[in-house]
Amino acid sequence: MPAPVEGLATADPGTLPLSAASSLFQRLRATTPQLARRAPGEHDAARWREHRIGERRYRVAQPVTFTPYAAARPCSARCLFCSENLRLLDAGAMAQTLRPGPDHFERLSAALTQLRGLPLSWSLSGLESSDDEDWFLRLLATLAAAERDGVQVEERVLYSNGAGFARGRGEELIAALRAFGLSWLELSRHHHDAARNQAIMRFRDGEAIADGAAFARVARRLSEALPLRQVCIVQRGGIDDADGVRAYLDWARACGAGTVIFREFSRLGPGYRDNATARYLEAGRVPIEQVLSACMDAPWWPQLTPQRITEGYYFWNLRLREPRSGLEVVFEASDYAAMHRRHASGDIYKLVFHGNGRLCAGWQPDRDVLWPPGADTPARGDAGGGADANAGLAERADG
Ligand code: SF4
């Protein structure tokens, strides 16, 4: 179900807790025609679905995404900001440390039978799916079989650092994704200069995608086969000003991207352990408003036409279009505290199948467990903790 669209000028800012809190909201409101409310209103019956999982009935937000967490092996990159490494003070197991058992795909299929009849979108994220080609191909086949068996799928999105596509079986993966009906692929790269990107992403030795020419080849090939969105997380040492944004846009367009997304590190809120990743996020954070405001003052800004602000349940973004090139440009911020509040509400905003064989309503593999029955400790709706935010490539399937 696509998020409904309305005029932004007449929308009540009080109903937009994330975008209207931005210091740029009034300025953006004056030039942006549309508002999309991706998060359903509390009493908007058309945006909630009652759905039974096991013996319990739940209220599920529409749209909702399902992530089969890519837990087959550690990621080919070691991004300094990777949210897989964030820990809540009261967190249990980390999703990224759980390796799937031999019956993983049977358990995934069993969990998916619980979701028949519920409109959802596939959101393939968490670590790097393409790092294990056999696992990834089997995952796609399992999801496709679930669709044939009655799971209602609206969109299919892959979040990737591109590593698997730069190895020997890239064409095989692309063909499988085309057959799967992928809606688009979000490819992360945080600087157009390969050395500066590598200082951020730290691909492991031998990963061809670390090289700038190899990345450009992969991106162009992907863009020939699939709708391609390139994702840049703004940060100190990376893209952090208007000149950097312009240079990145021109480079990404030459790589074949139809959309470029600039994201701020997710805002954490309280409750996270003081580890190396949390410290990096604090030291390297560049607020999206800082970058956006610099771009709005740049001489090239009038080349972009503002289209829409989207208010999600834990993110907001501004979408623009460059008519000359056809490029779509997105600036985005997200808030993990808002995400935790929603995940702890008792309603379902997110579905994740973890490496331990559990279907959960969030990113933490031992909380908010929906399936199998009886595995939930503590009970859903307990607002004392909330789910962890191990979202890896922060996903916003807001089409
Ligand atoms: S952010 Fe994504 S690509 Fe980077 S280390 Fe984490 S999972 Fe891998």
Image (cartoon, rainbow, N blue to C red):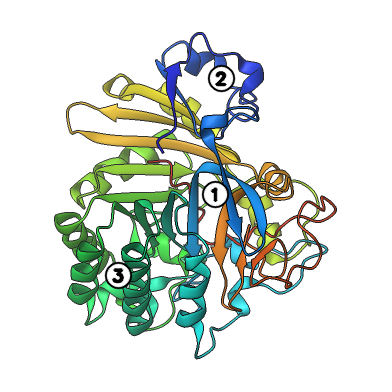
Quadrant, the C terminus: top left
As measured in the structure, the alpha-carbon distance from the residue carrying label 3 to the one carrying label 1 is 21 Å
Q: Residue at x 67, y 62 (%)?
A: 55
Q: Is residue 279 above or below residue 263?
A: below
How far apart are labels 1 and 2 at the CA level?
24 Å
Residue 345 image-quadrant placement: top right
Residue type marked 3: Asp
Sequence-wise first label, 3 or 1 = 3
> Which residue position holds label 2?
25
Residue of label 3: 211
How packed mark 2 is, by other alpha carbons closer than 10 Å (few <14, some 14-19, many 20 or more), is some
Location of residue 364 in the rendering, given as x and y in whole percent from the top left corner: 67, 65
Where residue 171 sits in the image (x, y, percent)? 17, 73
* In the rendered image, the vertical position of residue 24 relative to residue 398, given as above or below: above
In this rendering, the label closer to the viewer, 1 or 2: 2
Report the front residue among 122 and 168: 122
Which numbered circle lies on residue 236?
1
- Outermost residue toward the left? 224
**For this rendering, which residue is in front, 38 or 371?**
371
* Residues at circles 1 and 2 in contact by the CB criterion of under 8 Å: no
Q: SS at mark 2?
A: helix
Among numbered discs 3 and 2, the one appearing first in the sequence: 2
Residue 122 shows up from this direction: yes
x and y, in percent, of residue 174 in the image: 21, 68
Query: Does 340 sit left or right of 67 as displayed?
Result: right
Q: Amino acid at mark 1?
A: Arg
Name the foreground residue: 191 vs 187: 187
